[in-house]
Image: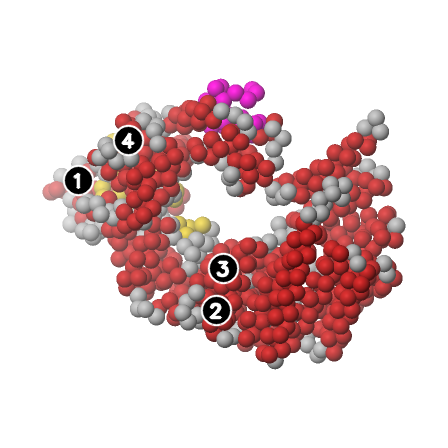
Amino acid sequence: MGIDPARIQTGEQLREQLQELFHSGGWSVHRLADKARLSAATVQGIVKGTTRLPQTRTLRKIVKACGQDPEPWVAARGRAIQAAKQLVASDPRFGGRHDDITALDKVRAEFRRQDRPCVIVLFGSPGVGKTMLAEQWAARVCESGIFIGKALEPLNLRGFSAEGPLTRTDVAKALLQRLGVSSDLVPREDDECARMIRRHLEASSHLLLLDNVGETEAIRDFLPKVGTSIVVITSRGPLIGFGVKEYLVRREVRRLSPDGSLELLTRWLPERGDTELDDRERVAELCFHLPLALGIVASRLASDRELRFQDVAEQLEWRGTLRALGGTRSEETNLETVYSWSYNALTPAARRIYRLLTLRLGEGIDAYAVALTGGIGLAEADEMIREFRDTGLITSRGKRFDIHDLLYDFALARRIQEEEPGAAFEFYSRVLPAYYGCVNHAFNVVNKQNPMVDAEFLADWRNDDGTRTVGADPASASRWFGEERANLVHLATAACELVPPPSEAPRLAFALFYFLDIQHHWGTWASVIEAGLRSADALNDLWSKARLLRDSGRLRYVRIRDLHDRLHDSDSGDTAWRADALTACSEATGFLNASADHYRRHGGHPDEAIVVQRELADVSLEVAKLSRRQEAFTLAINRYRAVEDMWKRSTSSVRDVSLLSLQLPMSEAYRLHGDLDAAQECLKTARDMLASGAVSHANLEPHLYRHEAALNEARGDLEAAAACWDRTVALFGDTEERWLHRARALAQRGLLLSKLGNRHARDSLQDARNLLDKHDSPEAAVVQTWLDRLSERSSPAH
């Protein structure tokens, strides 16, 4: 419909218009993110339509960066929100739950079509708005005209409350009273009461809300098995163990979306209109989009007309949300009190583990983490997780769970109040060795026989739970590290800052290097190295310092190598990066020489010491590539040959695989030096070693073909080079871990095919550009330049 924000009426139309604005301006995600001063992930979510509605301030920045007046777009956003609101009943206390209401309507329609009773369990963390959602949806059902029956008065079972839960007998009597059974007809036996309740619910249609249920046993025997009654149950946990699975649906109620939070605030504070939008968004974020917290804020704003959203936001930031909202008189609206009801329902052992979990991140926690935290087995950890889930203290996410921010703050406060001073040190001393073993196991699975794996530790490490958690294949191990990465980084850096640090702290800090390197988390890696070096100094741990100094040098080396491996347009004349790279090479050499000195003083771990010499040779090759001086290539070759001699004299189990991996960079050094026969001999040695079966290296083979492609191109055999690039692309595959290698190989293949006049050149370049675009890589622009040139050469004018 063309770019016209005045015509936007729905969220879908707003998303389409923003996408059209992006494409019509010829933007890339990174360029628009830079101009709008937003993260690339935020811009990508908007232009790809995965963000339902951008926040107001984000929308302003995007459209202003595109040269548009933001105000019509902000107004369009408001119309889109109003359109969504009309789909939900207009209870002034209720809002932000369109998706939940729609899902519950679908559930009800399906059970109605099947002429069955409908039992819905709404579960979630305390304060997330389960009761409000249940009440609103129940009212909607009654007002729809579709449900022909009687709505019973809701019953609060007080599963989590100061008074304690209702007994099963109390629940039965209360339900019979609501069903109209006179007190003199109520049976004395609980089982008879249960049968009478079921008969009433099955004989005619009723709508019953059972709120704040603590345990399945409290209500299981009362639920209908036939008929068309509707029972809505709210609980902090999912209530496992009902006998009516075919009639039961569970739905987890999660925190509101940013737009849902703003809608709720507007409904609760209609007199404030749509003012202070940016500050409203800040308040919603600081309340972590929890309806209970938002309700406390709205109550304060309603009672004090002089109080602004900006004032509230500043109070929440200064005092912390939990403390700032913890002083309400009503127990039911006091966050700390509401959370304490769940916390106190845990067993003492579970309470302690819940407290200690705040020594790690509150996201992506699995059973193994719980087991390590409590010093228990996985089976017992699963029981603990069930306790957390049944009391609403966690939010499940597949096989992992999260403790949301306010509950995390609550648990942290309890840890500070209730734990002994040495609890943190004891925790780290138990957890760090286990994760050190896990990381080394994952490293060894992905890159077998790497000299930097702590094979000696793994030989003595007997941790079946850890190895099962990580997995035994490269994909599982890489996925495990990706899921645990943020927590491992947090644990390593936090432990390194303790005074004194645990002895395992700098060792874990070092062990993270491999995955942080290959997954390109280089900024994080730098922070971990700094923390690790400080703790190694504090412990006077010579070995850890040698390893971490090596990491410091390697980090600089891999950044230089990446600059060389990046796709560069040779016609652009951009060589400014070379001076910075030479400086980084000098820094890398300094750190690696310091590492070598520490290994000599330590006197142990000779394999690691040889790796440092190998990496000094790698840096020498990068210097030679930058300077293009023959003597620099000669120096690199001599260093590689010296390292080769070291490995040949070694009796280590990693000797052969280390000699194998050495052949590729040595071949590159010979090729760039102009000695193509020596380069070919290095590659032949590598291929013969692989063919013999005596040594294997799954990650090396595609790189071997890449080097053979470069060598064939240097010989002028472009057809053979193209065949090697074909094989390289195929071996890199389509895995997430190797996407960048694959994209660069596709681009180099396309560039070579264009020299050959091959019609598949464009396909290869387009595949490379699409893959780079998918990951928001700036190298996509280089490939686009090559595609444009290819189009110019194939045009009739040429």
Q: Which residue is mark 3?
A: 489
The circle on residue 269 is: 4
**Direction from residue 747 to residue 65 in the image, left or right:** left
Residues at marks 1 and 2, CA–CA distance in whole angstroms: 67 Å
Pointer 1 and pointer 2: residues touching (CB < 8 Å)? Answer: no
Among numbered discs 1 and 3, the one appearing first in the sequence: 1
Residue 54 versus residue 487 in the image, above or below: above
Count neighbours of disc 2 (C-alpha within 10 A) and say few if under 14, some if 14 to 19, many if 20 or more: many
Determine the secondary structure under disc 2: helix
Residue at x 55%, y 38% (from the top left corner)? 33
Determine the secondary structure under disc 3: helix
Determine the secondary structure under disc 4: loop
Q: Which residue is mark 2?
A: 535
Pointer 4 and pointer 3: residues touching (CB < 8 Å)? Answer: no
Residue 165: x and y in percent read 22, 51
Q: Nearer the viewer, mark 1 or mark 3?
A: 3
**Direction from residue 477 to residue 192 in the image, left or right:** left
Pointer 1 and pointer 4: residues touching (CB < 8 Å)? Answer: no
Tell which of 726 and 530 is nearer to you: 530
Pointer 1 and pointer 3: residues touching (CB < 8 Å)? Answer: no
Tell me which amino acid carries mark 2.
Answer: Ser
Tell me which amino acid carries mark 1.
Answer: Gln
Tag count = 4
Count neighbours of disc 3 (C-alpha within 10 A) and say few if under 14, some if 14 to 19, many if 20 or more: many
**Direction from residue 184 to residue 287 in the image, left or right:** right
Q: Is residue 51 magenta?
A: no
Q: Quadrant of the C terminus?
A: top right
Residues at marks 2 and 3, CA–CA distance in whole angstroms: 14 Å
